[in-house]
Image (cartoon, rainbow, N blue to C red):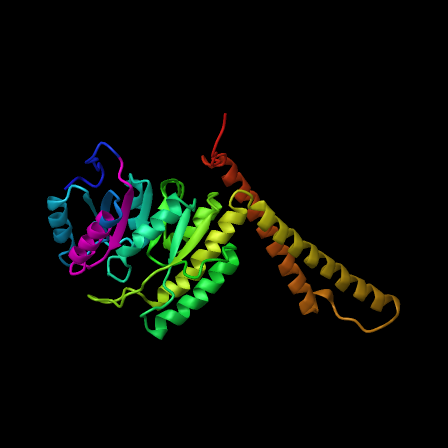
Amino acid sequence: MTDPNSLETTATECPDISVVIPLLNEAESLPELYERIVAHTAEVGLSYEIIFVDDGSSDDSWAVIERLAAQDAAVHGIKFRRNYGKSPALQCGFARTRGRVVFTMDADLQDAPEEIGGMYNMIVHEGYDLVSGWKKKRYDPLSKTIPTKLFNATARRVSGIKNLHDFNCGLKAYRAEVVHSIELYNDMHRYIPYLAKNAGFAKIGEQVVHHAPRKYGHSKFGLDRFFNGYLDLLTLWFTHRFGRKPMHFFGFMGSLMFILGFISVIIIGANKLYALSHGLPYILITDSPYFYLALTLMILGTQLFLAGFIGELIARNAPERNNYKIEKEF
């Protein structure tokens, strides 16, 4: 077993595909998953490497990975000291891939390795940058399928990728350049198609894939992932739109709020002057609740404007501020 920080290549030539499999307590399913990958790649004539990323399992998952690696030099393993999450697992796996096409799949046998050949052809022969699986017929409970439908509808709307039905499907295929051009953190694995689009890989396709019932263990899905998913989507949208130009958001909102507050103060003062000049009853400006609302708007507007200004200073000094993805040059 190679050290996770210095993974050595076991062949002089890069394999056709790299399969990255993040896992947490899936010892029972790993041997069958491995055998199905090997059988299918042999059937379609593809060379492979398999990278298992053990995300802090407490069962015998790592022992199984070591056993598989001992019998097959194309199997590699990465073991985290504790559970970090799927995104860090995929990020570390992506960094070690050498294949022309990179696949991701879950280790619970709900993703079918037999889909690899078709998705590979879509990448290599049809020119797609990314192909995402669509589990059109699911074997999940309603407590999971209904939130998933709502989540996917929102993700399509925000990302502009209208042709994807299942953003969070674990079974995906990528042109190698895609996984080496994006960075996964927090729980951003749900939005890899959106990240790829933002990185300039716009040809994103979908393939209907078989979804099998879970054979071993139990689901890691929880409602907290549903709510966190929306927060991550908002973060991704904001950083894509305003990450390099925060003043365009904070400066605009701050200026708008300050102007509204300032106009409100003028109107309140003008009303009092009108009442005084016509002998009408009036109240002190400081007794009007509208004065404090207007003052609050002006204060908040000033703070937002300053936040945008500070954001611009930070963005100006960021080392990646001029890191643009150049596809070709001569």
Q: Is residue 229 left or right of residue 266?
A: left
In the image, 297 versus 283, the foreground residue is 297
Asked if residue 16 is among those painted magenta in the image, a careful observer would answer yes
Q: Which residues are magenta?
A: 14-42
Asked if residue 304 is among those painted magenta in the image, a careful observer would answer no
Q: Give the image location of residue 67, x and y in percent.
A: 11, 49
Q: Is residue 309 left or right of residue 54?
A: right
Quarter occupied by residue 263? bottom right
At 44% from the left and 48% from the top, the residue drawn is 195
Residue 111 drawn above or below residue 124: below
In the image, 148 versus 33, the foreground residue is 33
Q: Give the image location of residue 29, x and y in percent.
A: 18, 60
Can the viewer see residue 232 in this picture? yes
At 24% from the left and 48% from the top, the residue drawn is 41
Q: Is residue 229 left or right of residue 15?
A: right
Quarter of the image for the N terminus: give it: top left
At 36% from the left and 47% from the top, the residue drawn is 121
